[in-house]
Amino acid sequence: MSESKGQIATRTYHSNPVAPVPQVVGSAVPKSIDDVADALKQKVGGDVVVAVEKEHIGTPFVVVSSSRIVDVLKFLRDDERFYCTNLNVVSAVDYPAKIEGVETQLKSFDCIEVVYVVQSYVHKHHVMVKVKLDRSAPKIPSVTGLFRSANWYERECYDMLGIHFEGHPNHKRILLPPDWVGHPLRRDYEFPEEYNGMKVPL
Amino acid sequence: MQDFTSPQNEETVGLKTEELTINMGPQHPSTHGVLRVQIHSDGEIIRAAYPDIGYLHRCFEKHAESREYVQIVPFCDRMDYVAAMSQELGYCLAVEKLLGFEAPERAQAIRVIVSELQRIASHLLSVGTYGLDMGGFAPFINAFRDREHVLRLFEEICGARLLYNYIRPGGVSRDLSPGVIDKIKDFVKYFKPCLDEFNELLTYNSIFVSRTTNVGVVTGEGAISYGFSGPNLRGSGIDVDIRRDAPYSGYNKYEFDVCVGLGERGIVGDCWNRYFVRVKEMYQSLKIIDQAIASLPEGEAMGKISKSPKPVGEIYMETECPRGNLGYHIVADGTKKPWRVKAKSPCFIATSSLDEMCRGMMIADVVSYLGSIDIVLGEVDR
């Protein structure tokens, strides 16, 4: 069986999403990061939101307490106003203690930030959620139970920055060899002089 | 008659069976790069498949900490070396957004033209090698013949065939010459019949159809949970496209359809539907290029922007690349160098689905599934 020539190009391809779409009145969909913070305070807990940042250029975000991250992302995923079913990325940033004399306009110091971006395909919005961790022993509950994509994102974060995700099913290095020493994206990382007897050119 | 199925049969007593471990790769022709998959199989049935990545890891993110913003653009090329224009575009748009700068209209239109040409080149490579994996050599030759024309156009536009460093923060590094514009018009005219021909050659070929339909089915919910994006997600029937939903670089000016897997053969979400979404998207890319060339505005191709910009802020931004949504998370601290550049790679997350998807499959179908999610190992490992 073959289709006739040119038929492919003229057809239109719009279709409905397969996943069930919750019906939400337009005004109830959150418009700003303040709405997100208010909803989190009401539904998840009053102490969950640590800070809301919206002054800087770029993506506004909400900082939540690290022990409640699973609850927060579960609420954002399941609540019909947010419906953020897709975890776009788990990124992490290392901020060392404040150094005098260096001109930098960073806002965070002496912590490791884990950044979650979740997105809704239905409401066409995305939310950035941040968590601040202690630099000496960064630990956070894993969200692999909520999103299957979190598995490899978290492994990469562990590999690059040494963050421990508690409850992760396969907590191993992913990009670097298993016997690598150190976590390269830490700001105090020292480049190795040799690896397995081979000299590392710098 | 002997009953061979009964375990008590005297000929089978004492026979031991065990799982066989097969290493597929890292130098396997169908892994499209240096990917190793450790397969535990029971006969032909796969019990587990563990992907092992990192062979091409260069830690672009660490490099980016010690380079200026403009110097990072070539690193972005080297992530996905068969779709370098799209990778550059995402990075440059994120940096421009941090600077509060918008590229001149002509530069935006040129960016759309080159990134759609890049989409065609990338999809041709993908569907051509997919045909090759499934045993058809002719579609591969056809696809590479046409891809060569796109690469020659790029060579004339910016001097390089694969790694361009063409799109920069502020615009594009040089303007399109009138000669190139005519050549792009000629290419669009030439390529449409070629695409029809390719389509007839491979898409409904009965061997190809039986190798790819109903194999590796990812449901819509599964695709979202795995974080699939781009043609992989649309192949599962989810109608999402950043170019339409959150337009960047003037995509809202152009009219095009978002192609979704409809299950013309097989069921929605199988390998054939993911493949066919790519073929359909090439028609849409031609449509966009046509419109962009026809309405190409006059003006500067490079905006007035500092050569070493010092943005402040933090941004996460995604663009629609041929392989899915490529995102950049940039933390800028007001110095010449970024504090952190993180690239979210669509191929990385598509590879993570390999284990769960391959369980219960035949070994030959792994090749079918790997080809249909279209991964490039340079981007998986970064």
Image (cartoon, coloured by chain):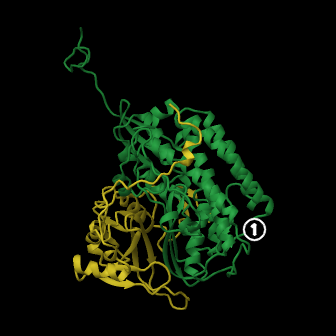
Chain colours: A yellow, B green
- At which x and y percent is residue A21? 32, 61
Can residue B323 be spotted in the picture?
A: yes
Q: In this rendering, would B48 be left or right of A202? A: left
Tag count in the figure?
Answer: 1
Quadrant where the image shows the C terminus of chain B: bottom right
Residue nearest the viewer, comparing A127 with A96:
A127
Q: Furthest-right residue in view?
A: B179
Q: Is residue B219 above or below residue A133?
A: above
Residue lying furthest left: B8
Q: Secondary structure at mark 1?
A: loop
Q: Can residue B63 be seen by looking at this rendering? A: no
Q: Position of residue A101 (x, y in %)?
A: 55, 91
The residue positioned 60% from the left and 51% from the top of the image is B122
Please state the horizontal and vertical placement of residue B123, each as a whole percent of the image.
58, 49
Q: Identify the residue under disc 1.
A: B175
Residue at image location 55% in from the left, 79% down from the top? B98
Residue B14 occupies quadrant: top left
Q: Amino acid at mark 1?
A: Asp
Q: In the rendered image, which quarter is residue B102 located in?
A: bottom right
Density class for disc 1 (Cα within 10 Å; few <14, some 14-19, many ≥20) is some
Q: Position of residue B176 (x, y in %)?
A: 75, 64
Subunit bearing disc 1: B
- Image quadrant in which you'd find residue A96: bottom left
Quadrant placement of the N terminus of chain B: top left
Seen as rendered, the residue at the extreme bottom is A101
Residue that appears at 38% across and 58% down: A149
Q: Nearer the viewer, residue A172 or A60?
A: A60
